Image (cartoon, grey):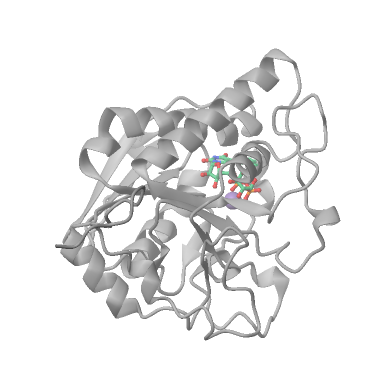
Amino acid sequence: EFRSPPGTKLQTEYNVDSSLDLRSRTDVTTCTDWGAPIMWDGMFDPNIYDEHHKKMGSTVALTVFAIGRYLELYLMEFLTSADRHFMVGLPVTYYVFTDAPENVPGLHLLAGRTLEILPVKRHERWQDISMMRMKTIADAIQTRIRHRHRYIFCLDVDQVFVGRFGSEALGESVALMHSSFYNTPQERYTYDHNPNSTAYMEKGDFYYHAAVFGGTWQSVANLTESCHQGIMADKRNQVEALWHDESHLNKYFWLHKPSKVLSPEYCWNLLNGFSKEIHVQRLRWGEKHDDRRT
Ligand code: 2GW
Ligand code: MN
């Protein structure tokens, strides 16, 4: 009879991340100092991940906000490209939050994909449009997502999928390295440096990009709830963090380390130019429209 040493927990669920080859890339860091994999092309076998998650019956919620002009500017291309590249082979529900549900055009989605349109009210300031996503996501997790999906990803709408963004990105708590800062010294990270903000931090691990975060519904519930609390506390103190929700997200991931970090392949900005370590682009920043802040 097998007896485990006292204090150890029997591992009942095979951890698919143990299939990662952390030494297959020597030009980049493939693991954080707290043991989370940093997902670079070449480290994983997509088939192993897809098979695992199909067997586990993993389902994924993708949340996106399209408020005001962002609906016509970005939503269609975002959804069309997600159908082609995001978690292909797994059941996915797109949760689109918008102030104009009647203007969401009809779409032919892949089999196994559904679209749910949820009305939200439009905040006056764009900073609030961006920040209040945290509260809306937290609420949607409690009312619907947790009953239907084990995993959730929350994305900006002003981006386009251009390559596989697959089940290798799934994990307990997932953060994305910001493509403009991954090669930048820490002093230049745009953390919030105002001690009066709850997002205040001097040093951190990485600069994470709020355009993509995810994980199990439980951990994203904690993240969004906690960021929302920080945002509201700042409002009471009449301060606003330097990069809004992104500052709060960075603070959260500093205090609660993500279990998986996505390389900048998972949200590349063409303006960053060419980098030899970027073997593949999976998601790309959308073009900024000059009139977007109207
Ligand atoms: C945002 C800024 C200025 C004018 C309009 C808006 C806007 C944003 C809007 O009119 N309608 C709307 O739906 N949004 C949503 O908020 C949309 O989902 C968009 O992707 C998201 C964040 O705004 P975005 O993409 O214009 O801001 P970025 O690309 O500069 O985002 C980074 O910084 C933000 C905080 O300032 C967030 O942290 C964001 O997650 C970051 O990627
Ligand atoms: Mn954006």
Q: Residue at x 56, y 64 (%)?
A: 267
Q: Is residue 23 above or below residue 188?
A: below
Report the number of numbered marks: 0
Q: Is residue 174 above or below residue 133?
A: below
Question: Is residue 68 at least partly visible in the picture?
Answer: yes
Q: Residue at x 58, y 58 (%)?
A: 34
Residue 77: image x %, image y %? Answer: 43, 60
Q: Residue at x 80, y 42 (%)?
A: 202
Judging depth in this view, the residue of 153 and 40 nearest the camera is 40
| Quadrant of the image occupied by residue 139 | top left
Residue reaching furthest to the top: 236
Residue 109: image x %, image y %? Answer: 23, 59
Location of ligand 1 given as a quarter of the image: top right
Residue 124: image x %, image y %? Answer: 60, 24
Could you tell whether 169 is left or right of 184 in the image?
A: left
Could you tell whether 176 is left or right of 135 in the image?
A: right
Image quadrant in which the C terminus is located:
top right
Question: Is residue 124 at least partly visible in the picture?
Answer: no
Q: Is residue 248 above or below residue 212?
A: above
Q: Residue at x 40, y 51 (%)?
A: 172
